[in-house]
């Protein structure tokens, strides 16, 4: 028996569980304490009592009932509200986690389970040599995307350990800060332009082992193609509702892994969440470019994003080019073409960079003095019911952000038949190069939904100029913007890849090429064509890209992916306030789109640039957004937590504030302010 005088009248017993692997030592310890004891003092008392000689510096208390860490060691137990019934576990903050990367490789590494997910992802990216960690996040696979696999593989086991890349010995995974030199702008380029892998001299920035060099190469190179059987086993969304399941499991960036029910050795997906790839540089971004390419490739193969048959063949040709080039290159070739290819790849990157940096600044003076316009004969197609002739030629004039059309060129000085304001509209390409069809589909917001207008151009050059003008106008920019010419070149470049002619050599010997065409296209096209037909068509398309280097093929693939109408859209099933049916909400880097769930047609588009404020009513889980001109919307999310959509909107706004002048440092506080909410 212990007398109260010995411990004082305010002491009470607290039961603590110690997460250790030492045999013969009790895991549950009982301490007599007072409420004014601070957390650091409680740690000291506990370590002294269990008398195990080990490094306890990474350990902290996890409060099981309240699902929170007691990380403020200067706070007292009273301040935290800890009482005798609290279940506190003294456990390591860094634990092993398995991550499946965009290239479907699984890595095993030590991650902080107590840091906010935003910080944890930053540490993971340091270890994997991926810059711009703010573009990525962690995704928990939702039950809906696993059902298909479970039915087919009831007896399947976890992948064997040799298939998992183990990075547990890295300095970052051990809880130590990553080497800042890895991201220094003055560092030696990490880029091998032929293989796309990091240069071995740079490996010393974050490790000294040859195994790490091999690991880095695995992350920077696409090593294997997928089999049709592998594709068949994976989740393939068929409808918009299926696509919404893909985005249901994003983790909350403002809370820790442990708070969100993630356990040691769990499997999570590391994915690019925000589709704004800032400052892509082949000298430093070998791993990042490869992982973006892989995420795009799987999105195409699994039909997470729709594309036409013509576009699918381009993607197949670029994959085939990457595959063929990788097999044929020797080490001597790599050395001889090293410098020239860096220049070629950087030139290829200009199209990708211009949308992020605002284009070439040398045109500023010209922009101020000259407001360009387009004027041409185009065909107007209006989908009208019972209309006998829906196509008619008019004289079109494009000025600022609007299109006016007249009966003919002579009447252009008078009043137009109609004036279409394109600001905030959806611009969708309607192109078939083989059939000489160059169409532009415009979905223009009006009071009761979207006004659908089709323009038909005569040739590639005309299409590129008008399409580029429409794309800029939809963002509120005119042709005076310095990015206009780059946009035109990007469109022409993409059309050129589509415009192939059958080569007699390619057509005559498809069986001589070591190619499995089923690995390069989605299952839908495997069923549509026989293997020999598919090989011939891919080789036909391959003629236009056969001179590209490995990295250029990947960059062109990313560029083509970015050109698809559905690029960058993440879907959620929502119920708008006042509506009696469910809709799909598409979230992109610059807008929200309300989509009819049954038909897949866009109903209304709202641009972030017109947004005044957004907030969440956490009690009824409703997101409310106010736009200019007294437009306001409110909706509840049915396919995921509303916090995920709230974070998407805030995250994209945060990413739009990035600048190269900021020396790659992130304003983490601003990110959490924009995305965290006020729960």
Image (tube, rainbow, N blue to C red):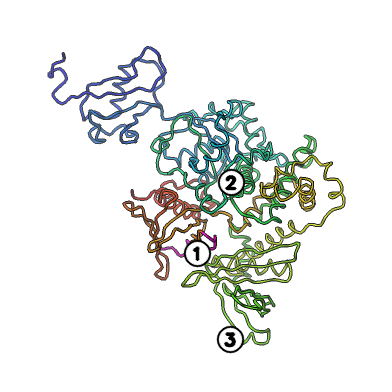
x 34%, y 36%: residue: 68
x 78%, y 53%: residue: 544
Tell me the residue that label 1 is attached to.
605
Question: Residue at the top extreme?
Answer: 24
Calculate the distance from the C-alpha at mark 2 to the C-alpha at mark 3: 51 Å
- The percent coordinates of residue 662 (x first, y second) are 51, 50
- Residue 491: name its quadrant: bottom right
Side of 166 where 506 appears, left or right: right
Depth order, front residue of 412/569:
569
Tell me the residue that label 3 is attached to.
415
Work out whether residue 181 can be spotted.
no
Judge depth for marks 2 and 1 and give the one in front.
2
Q: Determine contact: label 2, label 1, CB under 8 Å.
A: no
User: In the rendered structure, which disc, 3 or 1, sits on the residue that comes first in sequence?
Assistant: 3
- Residue 262: name its quadrant: top left
Q: Secondary structure at mark 3?
A: loop
Tell me the residue that label 2 is attached to.
236
Q: Report the span colored magenta.
A: 598-612
Depth order, front residue of 266/36:
266
Side of 641 where 444 appears, left or right: right
- The percent coordinates of residue 229 (x first, y second) are 66, 38
């Amino acid at each position: 028996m212990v007398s109260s005088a010995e411990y004082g009248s305010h002491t009470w017993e607290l039961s603590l569980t110690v997460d250790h692997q030492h045999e013969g030592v009790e895991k549950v310890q009982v301490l007599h304490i007072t409420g004014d004891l601070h957390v650091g003092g409680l740690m000291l008392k506990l370590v002294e009592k269990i008398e195990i000689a080990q490094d306890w510096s990474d350990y902290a208390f996890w409060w099981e009932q309240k699902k929170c860490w007691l990380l403020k060691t200067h706070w007292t137990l009273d301040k935290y509200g800890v009482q005798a019934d609290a279940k506190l576990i003294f456990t390591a903050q860094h634990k092993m986690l398995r991550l499946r990367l965009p290239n479907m490789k699984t890595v095993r590494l030590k991650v902080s389970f107590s840091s906010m997910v935003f910080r944890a992802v930053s540490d993971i990216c340091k270890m994997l040599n991926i810059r711009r960690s703010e573009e990525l996040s962690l995704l928990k696979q939702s039950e809906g995307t696993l059902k298909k696999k479970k039915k087919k593989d009831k007896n399947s086991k976890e992948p064997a350990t040799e298939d998992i890349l183990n990075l547990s010995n890295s300095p970052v995974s051990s809880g130590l800060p990553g080497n800042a030199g890895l991201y220094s702008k003055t560092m030696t380029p990490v880029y091998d332009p032929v293989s796309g892998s990091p240069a071995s001299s740079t490996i010393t920035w974050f490790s000294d082992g040859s195994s790490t060099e091999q690991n880095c190469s695995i992350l920077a190179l696409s090593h294997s193609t997928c089999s049709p059987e592998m594709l068949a086993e994976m989740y393939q969304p068929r409808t918009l509702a299926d696509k919404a399941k893909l985005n249901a499991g994003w983790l909350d960036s403002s809370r820790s892994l442990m708070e969100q029910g993630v356990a040691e050795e769990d499997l999570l997906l590391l994915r690019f969440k925000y589709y704004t790839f800032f400052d892509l540089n082949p000298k430093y971004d070998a791993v990042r470019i490869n992982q973006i390419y892989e995420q795009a490739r799987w999105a195409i193969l699994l039909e997470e994003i729709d594309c036409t048959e013509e576009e699918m063949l381009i993607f197949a040709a670029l994959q085939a080019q990457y595959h063929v080039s990788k097999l044929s290159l020797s080490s001597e070739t790599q050395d001889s073409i090293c410098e020239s290819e860096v220049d070629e790849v950087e030139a290829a990157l200009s199209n990708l960079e211009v949308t992020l940096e605002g284009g070439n600044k040398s045109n500023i003076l010209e922009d101020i003095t000259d407001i360009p316009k387009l004027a041409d004969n185009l065909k107007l197609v209006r989908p009208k019911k019972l209309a006998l002739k829906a196509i008619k030629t008019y004289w079109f004039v494009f000025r600022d952000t609007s299109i006016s059309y007249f009966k003919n060129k002579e009447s252009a000085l008078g009043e137009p038949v109609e004036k279409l304001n394109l600001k905030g509209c959806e611009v969708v390409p309607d192109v078939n190069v083989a059939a000489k069809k160059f169409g532009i589909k415009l979905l223009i917001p009006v009071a009761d939904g979207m006004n659908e207008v089709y323009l038909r151009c005569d040739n590639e050059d005309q299409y590129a100029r008008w399409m580029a003008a429409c794309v800029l106008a939809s963002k509120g920019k005119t042709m005076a913007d310095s990015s206009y010419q780059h946009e035109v070149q990007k469109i022409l470049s993409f059309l050129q890849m589509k415009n192939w002619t059958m080569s007699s050599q390619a057509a005559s010997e498809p069986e001589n090429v070591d190619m499995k065409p089923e690995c390069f296209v989605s299952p839908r096209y495997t069923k549509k064509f026989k293997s020999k037909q598919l090989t011939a068509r891919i080789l036909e398309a391959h003629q236009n890209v056969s001179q590209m280097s490995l990295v250029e093929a990947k960059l062109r693939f990313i560029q083509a992916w970015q050109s698809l109408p559905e690029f960058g859209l993440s879907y959620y099933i929502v119920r708008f306030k006042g509506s009696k049916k469910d809709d799909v909400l598409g979230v992109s880097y610059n807008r929200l789109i309300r989509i009819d769930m049954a038909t897949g047609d866009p109903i209304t588009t709202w641009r972030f640039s017109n947004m005044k404020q957004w907030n969440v009513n956490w009690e009824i889980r409703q997101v409310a957004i106010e736009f200019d001109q007294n437009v306001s919307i409110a909706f509840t999310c049915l396919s995921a937590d509303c916090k995920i959509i709230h974070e998407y909107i805030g995250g994209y706004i945060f990413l739009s504030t990035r600048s190269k002048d900021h020396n790659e440092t992130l304003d983490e506080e601003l990110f959490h302010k924009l995305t965290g909410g006020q729960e």
